[in-house]
Amino acid sequence: MSNSSSINRLQLTTFKLKSLLQITEAINENLTQEELLERYEELLTKDLKIGKILVYKFEENWKCILKSGNVGESYQSIDIEKDLLCLTEITPVTSSPKKSLEGYDIIIPVIHKNKHIAFVIIGDIDEEGEGISPVIKHLPFIQTLSNIIIVATENIRLFKQLLEQEALKKELELASKMQSMLIPNKQSLPMNDKIHITAFYQPHFDVGGDYYDYIELSRDEIGFCISDVSGKGMSAALLMSNFQANLRALFTHEISLAALIESLNQRVMHAAHGEKFITLFVAKFNFKTRELEYINAGHNQPILYQKKKKHMEYLTKGCVGIGMLDEIPMIRKGSITIEEPTKILLYTDGLTDLLDGKGVSTGTEEIERCLKNTKSIELNIKEIIDKQGINEDNPAIFDDISILGIEFF
């Protein structure tokens, strides 16, 4: 072997090691994806004299992350799935009949963990005199270098995604805490010789679209309600927060339930523009007259059970849901005189939409059975939760679940 050949081989090895060292140092410096790609592009164009470069990377879908040189517009018609995914080795473009690849010389697949993660397409290779360009000798090195760069950029993307997810998680946790402040906790609900109120609330996600409330309207009168926004997630939670503020502002001793429903409908239409609606059951109870007035605006029908008479009925009178129509055409108010110990169970559809072992909604049959006894409403709700297997790990739960139980003495 001649001295010049040995020197050239040494120089080539030194160049490759130096290039790999520079790229490794750049990665360790925590450079951005753009900065790493700039270093990569500079090495290929200035040191290896490559005129055109395209780099496609898979990020949920195939995306061109680097264009260098006079690539024109034809690259936009390259179909990675059809044109390139079949390639597992460095391939000359001459073997590809695709017109979109005309003007390029070499396709270098980048494979990581037996999956294609990128393709490097190069063209306008500088040729020194006659014969094959010296770049051809560097193709395995370019493939190795590309693999290092692409994996590094993917790690950067995943780390950035992780940071964004963590930030979103913290925002959702804060939103969940703020939303829970809008819903009365169990300890704040009244339990005395006139009335017992208890509740259960479990959002499907960090935030939910369910809402229940208890309001002292006067010395002798209380109001209570339960509602559910159509849909799930953040948009439902935001609309519900707005609805809670409006209901609290409007629901007073003086306003009639029908007027309350009409005002709430106007405000929900203004906020949601008809894209979402809210089902609502709202009621007033007067301790002196023992009269219960209610309106059911498209909500799941609460169940009323009289202990002595052993009589059960559903509270059905009302109207369409809030925000379904610009104006509600007809509102029917229900009225019941409570003359004996009576329980009322209010709930959202997350409770009745639970699936049994056969994938069928459980409905209200089990709820009725748990309510038909002289036990307290609190024990009834506990039994419902236990019987229905309501917990965070239950795969049958796919919606928010809220339960409000009221017992009059």
Image (tube, rainbow, N blue to C red):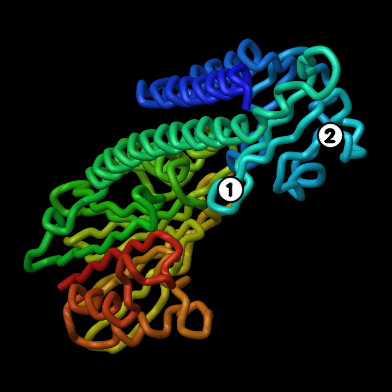
Label drawn at residue 324: 1
Q: Name the one closer to the observer, 229 or 86.
A: 86
Would you place residue 321 above or below residue 352 in this image?
A: above
In the structure shown, which secondary structural element does the residue marked by tag 2 occupy?
Answer: helix
Rendered view: 33 above or below 176: above
Q: Which amino acid does the dot numbered 2 rest on?
A: Val
In this view, the residue in front, 31 or 356, is 31
- Describe residue 92's horizontal placement relative to residue 145 as left or right: right
Q: Is residue 275 above or below residue 43?
A: below
Which disc number belongs to residue 239? none
Residue 241 in view? yes
Residue occupying image coordinates x 52% and y 54% = 331
Extreme front residue here?
2
| Residues under numbered marks 2 and 1 in contact, where contact means CB atoms less than 8 Å apart | no
Using the image as rendered, state which of residue 33 and residue 129 is in the foreground: 129
Task: Indicate which disc, 2 or 1, sits on the residue closer to the N terminus.
Answer: 2
Q: Quadrant of the C terminus?
A: bottom left
Q: Quick check: 10 above or below 203?
A: above
Identify the residue under disc 2: 93
Circle 1: element type: loop
- Of 8 and 46, the residue lying toward us: 8
Residue 375 in percent (x, y) is at: 18, 83
Dot 1 surroundings within 10 Å: few (below 14), some, or many (20 or more)? Answer: many
Q: Is residue 340 visible?
A: no
Amino acid type at circle 1 is Met
Percent position (x, y) of residue 5?
63, 22
